C-alpha cells in the first residue's frame, strides 16, 4: 500500500483550489460535500463556480494564486490543467504547509482523492493508487446500487441514539441491538413512516432488547436422542430454536442440526471413541465463553446428556463461570435400542435392575462387577463397546456366564439405517468383528430381539441372526 487511507477532519478548516475549468469543477463537486471553508483562485472561473460563490458556498478570488494565499490551508488542489502553473501553485501551497494534490499528477501529489460513495455519515472511499480508475468507478457503481439511499439517514439517527443504547450491556446485547437496527428494523421504519418513524422504532427496539438483555447467558445441556428428529423432546426443539450458539457432538445427526435457527452459530465439538477429538477443556472454554457473552448456549449431546456425556465436567465449568444451566433429558441409545428389538429394559421375574456400562473409560477397557453381570437374567446396555467386546466376553465367561446368554448388537439405533445383529455371548466375537459396523453401536447383554419384532420388516432391515432362533428373553 503506497497510499494509506484516512478520514481527515475538515469541518471549518480551509481548503484552497487553484483553477476554474473542468478539473476544478470535478474536484469542487466533491469538496462542496464537506463542511470545509473553500477558497478558489481563478482568473477565468466557470459559471458554476461563480454561482457557488454567489450562493456563499465558497469564496472566489478572480486572479491567479500568489504567495500567502494558502496560509493555514489544510489541503491544496492544483487544478489549472497546466503543468507549469500547477507546479508554481503547488510550490506556494507546499511552502505554506498544506497537503498538495496536483490533478492528474500522481507522482507530485502528497495525497490522492478516492472515488467516494457518500451516505454521510457513512463514507466509502475507493482507491486504486492510480492503477485502475475505471475499476474504482465500477466498484463505486456496484456499491451505490447495493447501499440504500436511506443508509446515511439511518446512520445519522443511529448516532444520535448511541447514548440511549448504552443502557444495554456492553458486548453481545449491544451488538445484537445495532445489528437488528441496521439489518432491517431501521429501513422498515423509514419505508413505513419516513424519517420521523425511525426514532420511535429505535425506542421500541431498545425496550425489546432491554427485556431480553436482562436475560444473562445460559447453558442448556440438551439430549438430541439417538438421531431421529421425531425422538427429540419438545423442550429440546424449543431450546434448539432459541439457541444463539449450539455446541454439538459428532454423533448428533445432521437432520437435528437442521432445526437450529439460521442465525445460530454451530460449533462442532467432535469426539469419537478413539478418533481425533476436541479436548474437554477446549469444549468447556467454548461453552463458557459464549455463555459469558450473553448467549443462549445449547450443548447438544447425542442420546441423553446424563449418560456417558462428561456432563458433570461441563456443568462444573459453567458453574465456576457463574452461569446458569438447565438439563433437557433425551432418549438414550439403550432405550432406542430396546424399543427397536421389541424388548424392555426390565421385566418382572427376569431382571429388577439394568446397568448402563461403558466398554472403555479414560484408562482403557473399563472394569465392572463381572460376577454380578454374569448371573442369569442380568440385562446391561454396553455403550462404546465395539472395541472392548472381546475383553467383555472374556471377563463374563471367566466369571461363569452362560455362553448362550443372548447379546443383541444394535447399530444406529433409532435411525432409519438401524442394523440389528442377534448373537450369543460365546459368539460375540467374532460376530461383531465380522459385522464390520461403521456407525455407533450398543451391545444389549441378556436380550435378544422379540420374535414378532424380528419377523416384521422393522426399519426395512430384518434382524440378522448370528444364532438359531431361540427364546426371545431368558
Ligand atoms: N449420551 C449418549 C451416549 C454417548 S456415548 C446416549 O445417551 O446415548 C457414545 C456411545 O453411545 C456410542 O459409542 C454408542 O455405543 C452409543 N450410541 C450413541 N448413539 C447411538 C445410536 N444411535 N445407536 C447405537 N448406539 C449409540
Image (cartoon, helix red, strand yellow):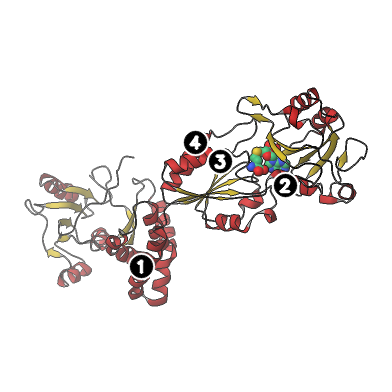
Which of disc 2 and disc 3 is earlier in sequence? 3
Q: Looking at the rendering, which quadrant does residue 369 occupy?
A: top right
Marks 3/4 in contact by CB < 8 Å: the verdict is no
Q: Quadrant of the C terminus?
A: top right
Mark 4 C-beta to ligand 1 under 8 Å: no
Give the farthest residue toward the left: 68
Which of disc 3 and disc 1 is earlier in sequence? 1
Marks 2/4 in contact by CB < 8 Å: the verdict is no
- SS type, badge 4: helix
- SS type, badge 2: helix
Gap between marks 2 and 4, in whole Å?
Answer: 30 Å
For disc 4, the marked residue is 282
Which of disc 4 and disc 2 is earlier in sequence? 4
Q: In which quarter of the image is the N terminus?
A: top left
Residue 455 x/y as whole percent: 90, 49
**1 vs 2, front mark:** 2
Q: Which mark is residue 335?
A: 2
Marks 1/4 in contact by CB < 8 Å: the verdict is no
Q: Is 161 on the left or on the right of 224, as rendered?
A: left
Amino acid at each position: 500500500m503506497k497510499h494509506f487511507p484516512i478520514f481527515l477532519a475538515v469541518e471549518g478548516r480551509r481548503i484552497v483550489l487553484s483553477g476554474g475549468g473542468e478539473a476544478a469543477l470535478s474536484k469542487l463537486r466533491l469538496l462542496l460535500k464537506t463542511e470545509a471553508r473553500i477558497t478558489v483562485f481563478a482568473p477565468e472561473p466557470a459559471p458554476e463556480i461563480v454561482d457557488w460563490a454567489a450562493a456563499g458556498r465558497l469564496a472566489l478570488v478572480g486572479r491567479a494564486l500568489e504567495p500567502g494565499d494558502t496560509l493555514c490551508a489544510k489541503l491544496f488542489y492544483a487544478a489549472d490543467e497546466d503543468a507549469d502553473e500547477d507546479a508554481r501553485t503547488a510550490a506556494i501551497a507546499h511552502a505554506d504547509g498544506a497537503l498538495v494534490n496536483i490533478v492528474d499528477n500522481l507522482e507530485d501529489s502528497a495525497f490522492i482523492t478516492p472515488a467516494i460513495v457518500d451516505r454521510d455519515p457513512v463514507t466509502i472511499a475507493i482507491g486504486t493508487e492510480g492503477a485502475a480508475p475505471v475499476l474504482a468507478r465500477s466498484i463505486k457503481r456496484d456499491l451505490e446500487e447495493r447501499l440504500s439511499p436511506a443508509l446515511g439517514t439511518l446512520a445519522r439517527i443511529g448516532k444520535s441514539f448511541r447514548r440511549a443504547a448504552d443502557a444495554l450491556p456492553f458486548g453481545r446485547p449491544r451488538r445484537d441491538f445495532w445489528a437488528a437496527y441496521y439489518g432491517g428494523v431501521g429501513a422498515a421504519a423509514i419505508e413505513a413512516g419516513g424519517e420521523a418513524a425511525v426514532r420511535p422504532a429505535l425506542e421500541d427496539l431498545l425496550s425489546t432488547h432491554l427485556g431480553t438483555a436482562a436475560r444473562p447467558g445460559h447453558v442448556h445441556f440438551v439430549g438430541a436422542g439417538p438421531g431421529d428428529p421425531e425422538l427429540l423432546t419438545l423442550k429440546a426443539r424449543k431450546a434448539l430454536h432459541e439457541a444463539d450458539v449450539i455446541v454439538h457432538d459428532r454423533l448428533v445427526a445432521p437432520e437435528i442440526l437442521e432445526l437450529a435457527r439460521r442465525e445460530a452459530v454451530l460449533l462442532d465439538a467432535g469426539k469419537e471413541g478413539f478418533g481425533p477429538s476436541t479436548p474437554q477443556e477446549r469444549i468447556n472454554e467454548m461453552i463458557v465463553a459464549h455463555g459469558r457473552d450473553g448467549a443462549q448456549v445449547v450443548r447438544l449431546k447425542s442420546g441423553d446428556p446424563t449418560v456417558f456425556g462428561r456432563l458433570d465436567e461441563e456443568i462444573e465449568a459453567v458453574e465456576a463461570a457463574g452461569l446458569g444451566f438447565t438439563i433437557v433429558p433425551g432418549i438414550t441409545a439403550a432405550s432406542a435400542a430396546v424399543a427397536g428389538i421389541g424388548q424392555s429394559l426390565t421385566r418382572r421375574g427376569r431382571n429388577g435392575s439394568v446397568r448402563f456400562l461403558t466398554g472403555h473409560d479414560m484408562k482403557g477397557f473399563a472394569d465392572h462387577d463381572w460376577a454380578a453381570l454374569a448371573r442369569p437374567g442380568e440385562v446391561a446396555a454396553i455403550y462404546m463397546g465395539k472395541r472392548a467386546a472381546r475383553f467383555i466376553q472374556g471377563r463374563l465367561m471367566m466369571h461363569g456366564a452362560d455362553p448362550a446368554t443372548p447379546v443383541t448388537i444394535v447399530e444406529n439405533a433409532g435411525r432409519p439405517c438401524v442394523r440389528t445383529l442377534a448373537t450369543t455371548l460365546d459368539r460375540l466375537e467374532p460376530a461383531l468383528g465380522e459385522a464390520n459396523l461403521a456407525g455407533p453401536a450398543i451391545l444389549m447383554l441378556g436380550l435378544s430381539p422379540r420374535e414378532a419384532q424380528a419377523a416384521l420388516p422393522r426399519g426395512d432391515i430384518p434382524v440378522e441372526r448370528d444364532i438359531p432362533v431361540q427364546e426371545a428373553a431368558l
